[in-house]
Image (cartoon, coloured by chain):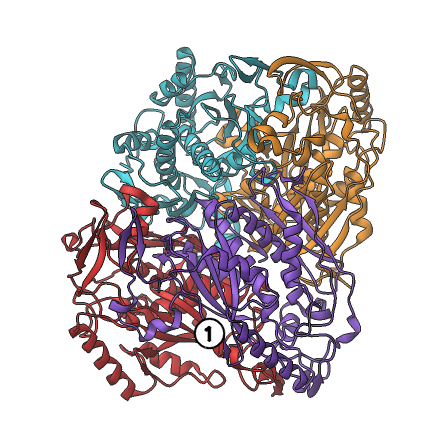
Chain colours: A cyan, B orange, C purple, D red
Amino acid sequence: MNVWGEKLKISIFGESHGEGIGIVIDGIPAGIELDMEEIARQMRRRAPGRNAVSTSRFEPDEVKILSGFFHGRTTGTPLAGVILNTNTRSKDYTPELLRPGHADFTGFAKYGASHDYRGGGHFSGRVTAPLVFAGAVAMQILAKQDITVGSHILQIGKIRDQAFDPVKLDADTLRRLGRLEFPVLEAETREKMQKCIIEKKQEKDSVGGILECGVVGLKTGIGSPFFGSVESRIASIVYSVPAVKGIEFGAGFRFAEMTGSEANDAFYIQNGKIQTRTNHNAGINGGITNGMPIVFRTVIKPTPSIAQVQQTVNLKTMENAEIEIHGRHDPCIVPRAAVVVEAAAAIALLDMIETE
Amino acid sequence: MNVWGEKLKISIFGESHGEGIGIVIDGIPAGIELDMEEIARQMRRRAPGRNAVSTSRFEPDEVKILSGFFHGRTTGTPLAGVILNTNTRSKDYTPELLRPGHADFTGFAKYGASHDYRGGGHFSGRVTAPLVFAGAVAMQILAKQDITVGSHILQIGKIRDQAFDPVKLDADTLRRLGRLEFPVLEAETREKMQKCIIEKKQEKDSVGGILECGVVGLKTGIGSPFFGSVESRIASIVYSVPAVKGIEFGAGFRFAEMTGSEANDAFYIQNGKIQTRTNHNAGINGGITNGMPIVFRTVIKPTPSIAQVQQTVNLKTMENAEIEIHGRHDPCIVPRAAVVVEAAAAIALLDMIETE
Amino acid sequence: MNVWGEKLKISIFGESHGEGIGIVIDGIPAGIELDMEEIARQMRRRAPGRNAVSTSRFEPDEVKILSGFFHGRTTGTPLAGVILNTNTRSKDYTPELLRPGHADFTGFAKYGASHDYRGGGHFSGRVTAPLVFAGAVAMQILAKQDITVGSHILQIGKIRDQAFDPVKLDADTLRRLGRLEFPVLEAETREKMQKCIIEKKQEKDSVGGILECGVVGLKTGIGSPFFGSVESRIASIVYSVPAVKGIEFGAGFRFAEMTGSEANDAFYIQNGKIQTRTNHNAGINGGITNGMPIVFRTVIKPTPSIAQVQQTVNLKTMENAEIEIHGRHDPCIVPRAAVVVEAAAAIALLDMIETE
Amino acid sequence: MNVWGEKLKISIFGESHGEGIGIVIDGIPAGIELDMEEIARQMRRRAPGRNAVSTSRFEPDEVKILSGFFHGRTTGTPLAGVILNTNTRSKDYTPELLRPGHADFTGFAKYGASHDYRGGGHFSGRVTAPLVFAGAVAMQILAKQDITVGSHILQIGKIRDQAFDPVKLDADTLRRLGRLEFPVLEAETREKMQKCIIEKKQEKDSVGGILECGVVGLKTGIGSPFFGSVESRIASIVYSVPAVKGIEFGAGFRFAEMTGSEANDAFYIQNGKIQTRTNHNAGINGGITNGMPIVFRTVIKPTPSIAQVQQTVNLKTMENAEIEIHGRHDPCIVPRAAVVVEAAAAIALLDMIETE
């Protein structure tokens, strides 16, 4: 089902090569001034064609707001944003050859002959553009509450950036990363990562990576126990992003090797405010924020569209076959995915805050 | 919000030391025969007090079905199961000392003075018992469709069991694991893991671990793109389980180091059926099942209740303080969590299948 | 689906002759003191066996709160209330003879052989008892915001009570009606109505009626346009009550004969507060409260269980047949339905207020 | 909240004088061929400016499908339809004078200064156009299952058309009514009603009316007890239509004067099929369809926009004031509302059928 949220309900639609893609966001408070330039800037972070490590397609991804916005402010009624598709090349794809790692097979399995296979149809990463629009709106509303969401590329291939310090993480760092085209904490890491991506591109291959996302400025008491836990809500929307195959909060999978005495974040009091000395639990206890930064990591699998010969099946003849995927594809989607994951987290958090 | 599901809506309630805990399951098809013995057996897998590596509390966790069940079959109307609390020792807890790693602080932050702090209240792991009941029901319905859910302990501390083979995983293996008190694939691993747990107990400490869960027998076409993806739905309910801090599907975080040519699971045809040669994507493409086994791993953090002295804050005096948590606690919750994670996955899958 | 609500999610369960009936209410704010005596009093308003115009069955309808309630206050986590069934006589019903006006036929059509037909199963009016519990809780929370819900019997057969004055309706009147066993505005109407009911009982028949429900003390701005309109939300839950077959707000069906100049409620200002001179629109414009009283009427059909011979079908033989329904049944359910309709309205309003 | 539905989730957006209005429909099955001409025809039934009894505004109401539609068939992914606003005259409205009977006051009360008041904004009847689009799609899908939805004008002012025969109502009658510009059963009634409307127009006034809607061809077993009852679901979406202030099923408010022996619809068997001799219950027992026609009536209040002088309040000066509403308005909205109510019913029924 393509509706998500409790108080802030979002409804996403569109196909890669259809008429248009978009989103309806219900539950946005009235009277919020929106900086359209900033929204456009966030959209550009996801847009393709910006540099050598990205696809050469150029899609302006201009969002047209159809409703819910009047005299520069939100009206409180549903905010609808639409992006019309303009630059598509449907000839790049042959429907009967199933592209490995893509949703061609499952799309036909689920929807039958009516599946819109062109460019992946509704499964396309392009459909995350409306999510970025919604996230950009959410981030502006959160910013007015001094909440900042940001991320960096923690890993590409075997190259790893320095990790966030989950105790000292601050808004300035997150904002600074949000202005970088290739957001990393260490400059030398960027060069190594970009070199790795270009190598994979030359090998007609692609590579995956890990994004580390941080949120600071959250009050205590956001989220609910069980089904409404912060982890549950963020994971549920982050896993909507195609290519995401894992998400961990705080110490994440390292908790397996930890003891309780190491893992428990001891409380202490400073200037009348309760804090934790470490932050292995990512600012979340029992599904509810404790006021410390949220840090989570999410893995992005390598772009499945590669120009190498791959083994597959021809759906028409039901025989084994080979496929080479040409066209314009990112050798590594991780840098463009950063703002998508931030957007997802921002939407989840705003929904939880508005549900309070 | 403590309601989960689209077609199969579950509503969970209860506190650790309250009158009772339970669940209402709406959307169960009519006419399903339920094996109450098998349900009781699944409940026992989660119940405490079974062996040396578990807490010494003994709670029978007997579920009384109040509705939706008539003449041994489901009626199609809401199925309500209740467990009355009998064996509780509220004296073990002092509300003003915040237990590190627990939800005491966030519980008071969210609910104020009315928070039921006794034994963690609604945040208690005990509230997963009704989830196991719902999961046991779901597993029986799935079994009639030849779908099997099972899990093993992949890791405790630094000790690691053999991983599932995601291509060859079969129902017999999963069923066999479900009958083990301490489910692992390699017998020698079990001894090492249990030794590790007992050591931690002697050190007044606890230890975390990783569960690996598998599902076989799924048809193609289950799940939806985006918000209804199999990963999104399973993660959303698994993250409801207290202590879960990470979940990854298939190759998971290893995708970061993989190339597209490695990560894409090549399709081939065998006996007229499309399959994949590898299964890094956990049987899921574009959020929808492709008929291969689902394999996911979830990390369980170390039990936060430990008898060591810990630094904390006294909520009444708002001063730094120390706490020693006595009472009966598991040095490692991972073995008991196995059936909870299976239950969560079974509920998510049944919901998705019924929503088709 | 038996879950209702946006912020205040309620989940109802139970069958007439099953083990128990109950409700889980999620989203109740924390720290609300509940007057259990007042809740019991509201439950008694719905309970059978209180007087000559009601059935002779006696069910104490004692609600046991299992969770969400601690030290006399709500905890903010799900509030579960259960009523165990004690006094049932399953022998009264023969499953194969379809009772006209009841859900026997549709129950078997939907659920097949597994339908719990005993006393109507989940379709029984008895399952409204948990709704009254939830409504009694909601009414107490609304009362703390000076919002009062009440109702009277407007019509039984052809006998009609005076209607509410939708402009001058006040909380005292509504509260006074809530303490009456047979709530009407004019004492002489009561006698005529009761006489009518007893006549129908003697004729082995039953009779319907209309309830008029009022709400005062609402602030402006509650509700939403379209799907979240006050009328939509109240109607959706009131129509959950078995036997309800119509609901109208304000002038209701009389709007058909009115002109715009009559129907529009002119605004005027008094003591700085905007009010309307008439209140044909029931305090609701565009689905949102304008601060004037809400008045709606709902029709309750005659009890279908009558002792007269009725034509029907034997589901086993699939032949025409006759049925006489003995057992203890209300000749008129309207007086007992009053608190159920009030409860439904109170739940809907609290949900809308909490969703703001 | 502007999202409606369980399986078939619809999300509506737009304002009268904004950039565009539209709807996203999630949950439409894949592979449904859509007759675009028929959809356009249904849109024209609601469109203004068609005749003397309607407003002189002309809005083509052309729906552009942006997604979910490929090669003439639905794809199974969200279907988005957008109507761009072209012909608007914002100058007709002065925001500070509250129009009686409209949502100006409640709009400002809820959304504050950011409320888009132009032409009623999101509260405008114009926003029902996307609902008609969704309903036209739903009706085509229902038609493939031999389910027909239709309606006629039962009453305008004091003039009343013959009522449907709830037992013999047939698809041909409903389809024939759907092709009439002014749908009534008796030709002479039409003339009287139209005369009445024109008179009210000349008096600078407007008039209300009642629509009677019928559905035939439904299988047994659709709907659920309680919150998912057919009455609850239909009422909830019909009450989303601005101007609706009452809805009754079958005998509706006449049940108040009926006895059980009259009101119960006796079952009998004919050609192996269980039917009822009368159909006072509108084909619904216990919230679930019994296979007989559904008949419901809904009242439409008089258009609040009238050219007469009306008393009101100036929101800026907070003083009593007068208002005359000029511009192009329908003296009676009932004929145009027919397809909107049918659309709402069709959406509700398809949602319930798909949820089975």
Give residue A279's position: percent from left, percent from top: 57, 18
Numbered circles on residues, count: 1
Q: Is residue A91 visible?
A: no
**Residue located beneath label 1 in the image:** D147
As drawn, A137 above or below D103 = above
- Quadrant housing residue C292: bottom left
Q: Residue furthest front?
A: C187
Amino acid tagged 1: Ile
As drawn, B33 above or below B131 = below
- Secondary-structure class at tag 1: loop
Residue placed most toward the observer, B56 or C299 = C299
Q: Seen in the image, is C221 located left or right of residue C141?
A: left
Crowd class of label 1 (few under 14; some 14 to 19; many from 20; radius 10 Å): some
Residue placed most toward the observer, C184 or A166 = C184
In which chain is the residue bearing label 1?
Answer: D
Q: Seen in the image, is A277 located left or right of residue C126?
A: left
